[in-house]
Amino acid sequence: MAAAASLDAASQQVNMGIGARTNGRWAAAAAARPGSYIETQRETAAVDSTAQAQMDALLTGSSGVSGPARVELPLDAISSAAFGSADVEHIIASQKGDFTVLTHRDFPSVSIRIKQLYSPPPASQLKEHDVDPEAFCDPTVTSWSGYIDTAYGGKSLWFYFFESRSNPSKDPVILWTNGGPGCSSSLGLFMELGPCRVPERGGKLTPGPPINGTKWHPQSWTNRANVFFIDQPVGVGYSYSKTEQKVYTTEEAGKDVYAFLRVFFSAFDRFKRNDFYMAGESYGGRYIPIFASEVADRNHDVERAALKAGKKVDRDQLINLQGVLIGNGLTDVSKQISGYYDMTCTRRGGVEPILSIETCKRMHTYVPVCRKNIAAHCVDSVNPDLCELWMDKCSEEIEAPYFYTGQNPYNIKDDCKSGLEPNLCYDVTDDIRKYLDRDDVRSLLGAAPTEEIGKFASCNNDVAMGFNRILDSSHDNGFNVAGLLERGIKALVYVGTLDWICNFNGNYEWVKTLDWSGSEEFKESKNYEWVVDGEKAGRTQSGGGLTWATVYEAGHMVPYDQPDSALAMLNRWLDGQEL
């Protein structure tokens, strides 16, 4: 027990959920079961006026947002005449940096506060050396920011949206979320795959206007895609709740994300026919399969309702989900837990064994025991007491020895000089935190001020502990990936070979045992090295709609460590090419 207790502080900072401390019971999880968002909305439609009153109260609070333009979707002729435009984007842009509130008739409990951050002049030739001081992050594209507000519970989820550098109206749309649970997607934006990065300054405050606080990122995923970055669940990053509403299950978080997408695509109709992908990292291995399943199931509800009514399916009610991306994810703890032994005690991790022979012998004994008991009590059947017991015990026996080394859990070649808490072993996370805590940056973005929601934090430990108490991380999400594949939704699972916390050995364990109609095609496919710019980038295998890829010399945050390989991998996969 002493070993487990000493892990508490470290495990809450780790951007993943395997074996994290769990001290609660299952009752809260049982009360938060996934269901049809459409059915929920039908049940609550009778109290629209109450919802609107609650929403108005939220929007006119101490944040200073008072009397914003309000657009109800789908936009009708009367509203178009009132605004002098039938183009919702134009209406938002005309507010000159103030928020516009978007509501939707089908989602009375949800609205979006959104503002246009910047739009370059027509035919702009701006490059990284020619920066418009009024721009934010990327002066060559149109960008947006705002909050997803829910009246029932008062949740406000923060998001950024950057249009593609190539052809926004035709390029795919990608939703990105970081993991934790409880870590902000600003890490993905400013450290990994966004159109700009916050320069590493060793924690010193970044000087100059907001645009000068960032640096152009040439390997951004926005080169050929429109990308959302969302801080979820509530309490993460700039997200907040005025009513102390909490979300501690992935299924509940998925409902908020689905509603947001429906409202957004209704407003930005030039994107609704674009291919749509959902992507996430780390705990995203839990988030993304569930979020995508929510979208697929709600699409199915719409199609079935139309069939039952003898009507043609309204394509505007469907989200054009084409695929999911899981980077260094936690997807099935019962299978992935064996990877810790491989990474630290054998050469199968790609490095010399890290732990002592005595320690490894004890770990080797517990690997099959933990796989068996976590599967039996957390996956095959749900016994919350036994599940909690075995998650704790296996964390103590299989994860704790590596934590005691002080090495970076996200890169086994790094000694974590920056410290695990609060910097997650990387100085740049402190730079990002300081940048996003600047009053002028918060004001430009439209984020709630510090006096209202507190200082910005990369990760929220309270959110992590809430998910852990409910044992949210213990589920097998591979079944959801298989279900998506069966419905023609392709999947890319990629892993940096230097990551320990969500390592490639553990990830391949659940991938190779995944059961769907294309599993034999995948198993029989060639596993080979893929190449970028003449250099070996990793290994890959593809079949039945599933692509597996490792990325050499990359840790937990693949686009941070290997931006060229990450971008090449993304573009080839989106194009349907072999890596």
Image: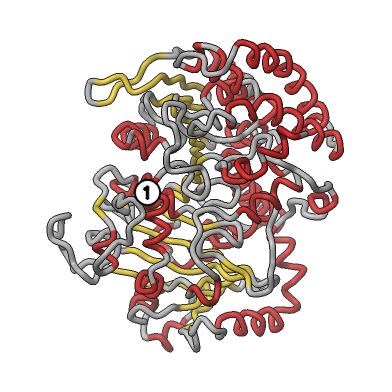
Who's the residue at 77% across and 27% down the image? 375
Q: Is residue 445 above or below residue 326?
A: below
Who's the residue at 42% across and 31% down the image? 414
Who's the residue at 46% across and 48% down the image? 423
Residue 354 visible in the picture: yes
The spot of residue 292 in percent (x, y) is 58, 45
Disc 1 secondary structure class? helix
The spot of residue 453 in percent (x, y) is 55, 71
- 64 lies left or right of 438: right
- 500 lies left or right of 187: right
For the residue pair 72 and 441, the one nearer the viewer reads as 441
Residue pointed to by mark 1: 428
Name the quadrant containing residue 529: top left
Q: Is residue 325 above or below residue 151?
A: above
On the rendered image, what quadrant is the C terminus found in? top left
The spot of residue 533 in percent (x, y) is 22, 25
Number of numbered discs: 1
For the residue pair 324 and 469, the one nearer the viewer reads as 469
